[in-house]
Structure formats: C-alpha cells, structure tokens
Image (cartoon, rainbow, N blue to C red):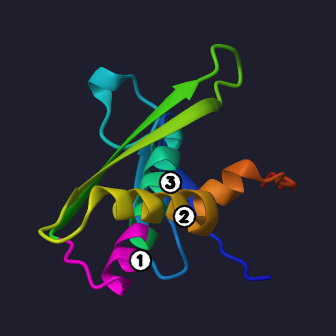
Amino acid sequence: MAKRNVTVRMKADHEYESVNPQGNVVQIDMYDPQDKKAQSPMDMLLSAVGSCASVDAVLMMKKKRKTVNDLIVEVEGIRNDGVPAFYTDIHLRFILTSPDAKEEEFAKVVALSVEKYCSVASSLKSTITFSSEVKAV
C-alpha cells in the first residue's frame, strides 16, 4: 500500500495551510462566504473529486485520439442538515470542448472515470478507518 501525507498548520483561528512533502501549499479557511480567501475543507473535497475525475477523463479521451481543447467540471455537493454536515449527494457536470469528440463517447469515459478510476470518488464510497494520536507541548 502506498502512503501519502500532508501537514496542516493553523495560521489563525479560521485559517490553515496544508503542505505536502514536495512543498506544495494549499490555503484553507473556514470563514463565512463574504470573508472567504480560500476554499474550505468541504470545498476542497468537491475540488478533489472534480479534478481527479477530470484527469482520468482527459487521459482516456486522448487515448481515443480525441482533441481536448478545454474541460470544465462544475461540482455541486448537497450536505446533510445536521452535524456533521457531510455530503449526501455530489453531482458533477462535465463540459468538454472538442472538435472531434462525440457526447456519447465522452459520457462513457466520464462514467468510467467517476465510477472506476477516480481514487477520490472511490475513497468516498469506501469504508475508511480513522485513527488519531495527540501530543500537547
């Protein structure tokens, strides 16, 4: 099994940054919409699903020798009303700009990407074991 890791550090009460071992930084905040400067963790989850599925879809289209001029994925999540406010439904709308791709073949590629190849979507469908440890200094 391959391991991945990030380090999340608090910058302020509602601001965090996440850094991977390669030094790539992602800003995160939990401010109300009018004060947002970065994505929230739940926004990032939608971004992760959309980008993961996109990469696979584009690669599969190119394997079919189709031209991909642009791809936009609009991702909408519906959250549970209670606490925790987890996603109950996620809808992805793929918009492909291509002079030679047919909608039907792209729909098949997207279905494969979301249902089979996207690691993020598969993680959301899976049973994940969480563990934690604490240290106060």
* Amino acid, disc 2: Leu
| Number of numbered discs on residues | 3
Which quadrant would the C terminus be assigned to in this image? Answer: bottom right
- Residue 107: quarter of image: bottom left
Q: Residue furthest top?
A: 81
**Mark 1 — residue?**
60
- Relative height, residue 105 to residue 86 (above, below): below
Mark before the other along the chain sequence, 2 or 1: 1
Query: Which contiguous range is marked in magenta?
Result: 57-68
Please tell me which residue lies in front, 96 or 78.
96
Residue, x 45% and y 71% (percent of image)? 56
* Amino acid, disc 3: Val
- Relative height, residue 65 to residue 118 (above, below): below
Q: What's the mark number on residue 49? A: 3
Q: Are marks 2 and 1 in contact (CB under 8 Å)?
A: yes
Q: Is residue 19 left or right of 67 when viewed as pictured?
A: right
- Relative height, residue 27 to residue 75 (above, below): below
**Mark 2 — residue?**
112
Q: Is residue 62 magenta?
A: yes
